[in-house]
Every structure is written in structure tokens, then in C-alpha cells.
Amino acid sequence: MPQQNPVPAEAVDPSGIHAVTWRNGRLDLLDQRCLPGETRRIACEDVDAAIDCIREMVVRGAPAIGITAAYAAVLAARHRLQVDGENWLPGYRADLARLSEARPTAVNLAWAVRQMLAAAEAGDGADPEAALLAAARRIHAEDIAMNQAMARLGADLLEAGSVITHCNAGALATGGLGTALGVIREGWRQGKITRVWVDETRPWLQGARLTAWELAREGIPATVITDSAAAQLMRRDPPAWAITGADRVAANGDVVNKIGTYSLAVAARHHGVRFMVVAPTSTLDSGVADGDAVCIEQRDAGEIWAAAGGPTPGADAHNPAFDVTPAGLVDALVTERGVATPPSKAAIAALNDR
């Protein structure tokens, strides 16, 4: 498969975290379930191990899941060549179909799988591993470049003050630097951000465990609050912006993101706090008309009961992983191609066409 652009031997995460990387011929993942107490890495030798890591939240965040899927597709091709020889493509397609279904809501997963399948089908079929690895590295490197572009565009919207963020949209959730945290990192570098309020983000506590850890590594002042404290914070000491990432943005600008994002957006609008969503164009999904058309992943109720010390007899638990924030609650959607202020069907279409 011809390469149209130079591809780095390895995509370099500017944060130094390397949540997802390719090392010694294997997919290498930072196990985010263990942070911040332990830094542990998991090496995936085959596509099934990668699927398990995606499902079990070893890796999370839409862009990082997409990059993981790209490298997992390389492992799938290697295995199929060993098992099926020259007739490897049919089994490869089946492997990628399973990979695409590992988590249903984050659109980057299916997007990356389509990219890798197209790369495989465009090759000469004899020895695809090198070409597919180049394609995966390109996806990884492009994600980092998009994060850097979004960081600059988003920081241009900031003025001096504090900000609040939800979940984790940093280097741990991307190829490096981050979407929402990329803007926050750049805002801090420019002297605009004075403090970051971090929603703990139940039930997995991605804010308290992951975002706070990322910010503390770089000396950025961060204060963790319970999710339910955000509205009171906005009433008494309103931040200038609420800044989040996104797992999917519908054609009309509705934002699908970690559960609790909608509540934060409602509180922000009531208190006059502007709301910024930062996401690459690979997260824009023109195939769904609005947020209600997106399949919202339902996770095991045990994740909720774990925080309570065990199930309550006679009570059920409802554990959606994501919610939908209507486009009307979003003041700015920042992508690597530009900023929609506010997002709308026409603005989303224009970003996709650039």
C-alpha cells in the first residue's frame, strides 16, 4: 500500500504518558484501572486481548480506543496470516467486526476499524502487516496533531479565570496531550487558567483518579469536587468555562459524553458559565441525526454498588456510561478544523466538509 505522507516510526505523546503505544511488536497499554496508585502496563499479543482491554476499561476515552483498535487490527492481520495464509482477508473482516463492537457508543472505535479495513483491502494482500502498522501509526500521529491544533483553538477562547471539567479527556484518553485537557494545558501555559475544578465523575472516578493525576504531574492547580457540588460551585464561585471532551457528536450538534456531562451543562447554562466541548472531527458522526439516535452503553450495576460497599437488598441499579447534552447547551465546539459557536446542523456539516 503506497504511503502518501511520511509516517513517524513511533507517535510521540507530548505529555510523556503514552497511554497507548506500539512496543516490541505488540500493543502496549497503560492500565488506567490502577491509576493513580499503581503504574502498570499490559501488552496485548492478539486482537482478543485488545478487545478485553477496551471492554474492561484498561483503555478508555474515544480517541484512545480508536488508536487501540488501529493497533489491534495489526495484531489481527498477523494472526490471520499465520492461520489462513493467503486467504486471510475473510477471517480478518470477521475479527474487525468483533473489534468494532467492543464498546458501542464511542464513534472513534468504528471509525478506526473502517480505516484499517480499507487499508487492508487496498494492499496487495501478500504481507499487509507493515502497511497496516504504518496506517495505525498515522492514525496515532494524526490524533496527537489534532489535539495540538484543538489546544490552540480552544485556548484562544479563554480569558483569565478558573475552569471546570468532567471525566478525563487528557493524554490518557487520546494519543497524547488530550482534547479538553489539551485546551486546559495550553490555557495554563498561556497564564489564562488559574485553577481547574475536577468533577470526580462517578462511578469510575475518572476525574478524581485520572484527570487530577494528569494535572498534578504538570503542576497545574486542581481541586476535585463531587459531581453534585458543581452547581453550588457555579453559584458561589463560577468558573469562566466548563470544558469537556466527547465520545460522539451527532449531526445536529448534540454531544454524547460521560454520564454527568448533561447535568454539568444544565448547571452551567443556569449560572451563565460557558460550555466548551473539544473533540476531533473523527468524533463527529453525520450518520446519526441527533443524540437520541445513539446507542448508550449500559454497564454492569456492580460498578455502582462497589462504591456503596455492595448491593442494597431489594433495590436495582441503573448504570448508563454516557448521556446526551443537547446542542443548545453548548457554547463552543472546538475541532482541529475550526470552532463552531455554537454547534448546529449547518456548522457540523461545514466542519465535516473542510
Image: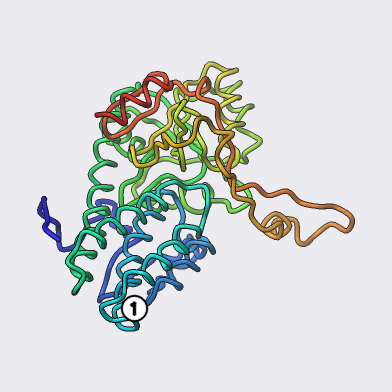
Q: Is residue 293 above or below residue 128?
A: above
Does residue 18 lie above or below 110 as drawn? below
Q: Using residue 249 as the reference point, say whether residue 182 is left or right of it.
A: left
Q: Position of residue 138 (x, y in %)?
A: 21, 54
Q: Quadrant of residue 240?
A: top left
The residue under the point 64% across, 51% down is: 298
In this image, 102 relative to 108: left or right? right
Q: Quadrant of the N terminus?
A: bottom left
User: Outermost residue toward the right?
Assistant: 314
Q: Is residue 8 above or below residue 258?
A: below
Nearer to us in this view, 190 or 139: 139
Amino acid under label 1?
His
Q: Total label count?
A: 1
The residue where tag 1 is placed is 79
The x and y percentages for residue 45 are 37, 77
Relative image position of residue 29 (x, y in whole percent): 38, 66
Question: What's the coloring here?
Answer: rainbow
Q: Residue at x 54, y 49 (%)?
A: 208
